[in-house]
Image (cartoon, rainbow, N blue to C red):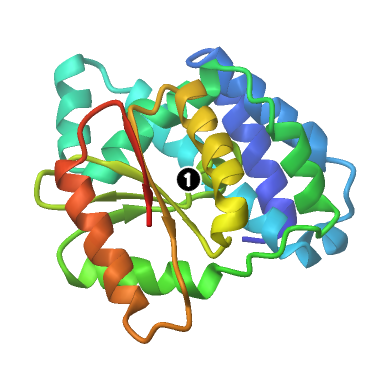
Amino acid sequence: MHSLEIKAQLKSLMKEASSIEPCLAKRLDEINRWVKDIKPGSLTAKKFVMAFLLEVIRDADVWLKLKGLSSPELQDSAFEKMTPTEQYWYGYLFPQWLNSSDPKFYIWKQKLMSSEFSPTDDDILKSIVQTIESRGGTVWRCYIADFSMATDLIVSFRQRKPLCLQVTTVSNNHSQKKYKNWQDTLQMWVIDRGLFLSYNPGKPDFLEQLVTITLHNSDFLPLGRYLQFP
């Protein structure tokens, strides 16, 4: 989608949301004001901003379609067609984000726009996603969860219980502070369980270990637990 189409879509969704979901309209207006004065060529060149905008458009469109269904039964039916991780996003975390103050939103919008964002772990996360899906799990990955909710991936497995996952290569000397910040963030968003995984990319089997630990804890980690491993 071209940057001009994105801007037009944002305005269209904002107008639609104004009579259905005011909190969504407010978020879209905030995002629209953020990008409206950026020239089309300059905006297109900012690939991470464009990727975020496309995600927001997707989420807003899905959310408005859900809210536009005429009965709770139809809404339930629509949710049943989603994966467990999609259900968790659209049924819980996305509306949480719409209805809450996000203290990190202003900061990471600036980083995206100034091209400070550099996803060094992108290849690892893509490999984790592929491996989880090959083993029958489901995954959700998006900018809002990553930047605002300290969640690289939302994962579910056999028990269909979504788990918020943060992956890091930070050494043990620094991981405790990052772990505490991560746990505080999850609790602020009322995320009731999470997994904080540190890994050594030098180990030949680290990817399989990451996935095995993640899928096991998706099924069995109790509510109210924020597990750091190792």
Q: Nearer the viewer, residue 130 or 58?
A: 130
Q: Is residue 187 above or below residue 226?
A: above
Q: Is residue 222 above or below residue 150?
A: above
Which amino acid, mark 1? Answer: Thr
Query: Going 21% across and 40% down the picture, which residue do you hit?
Result: 221
Regarding residue 149, the answer to whether it shows in the image is no
In the image, 52: left or right of 228? right
Q: Is residue 125 above or below residue 52?
A: below
Q: Quadrant of the C terminus?
A: bottom left
Query: Going 29% across and 51% down the picture, which residue do you hit?
Result: 155
Q: What is the x, y in percent for residue 128?
A: 36, 68
Q: Nearer the viewer, residue 140 or 1?
A: 140
Q: Quadrant of the N terminus?
A: bottom right
Q: Is residue 69 above or below residue 79?
A: above
The quarter of the picture where residue 229 lies is bottom left
Q: Residues within 10 Å of mark 1 (few under 14, many from 20)?
A: many
In the image, 215: left or right of 22? left
Regarding residue 73, the answer to whether it shows in the image is yes
In the image, 180: left or right of 221? right
- Element at label 1: loop
Query: Going 47% across and 45% down the picture, which residue do you hit?
Result: 151
Q: What is the x, y in percent for residue 171?
A: 57, 62
Of all residues shown, which one is farthest toward the bottom? 204
Of all residues shown, which one is farthest toward the left? 158
Of all residues shown, which one is farthest toward the front? 173
The total of numbered circles placed on residues is 1
Task: Say which residue label 1 marks.
Answer: 151
Q: What is the x, y in percent for residue 89?
A: 37, 37
Query: Going 30% across and 43% down the picture, which residue do you hit?
Result: 163
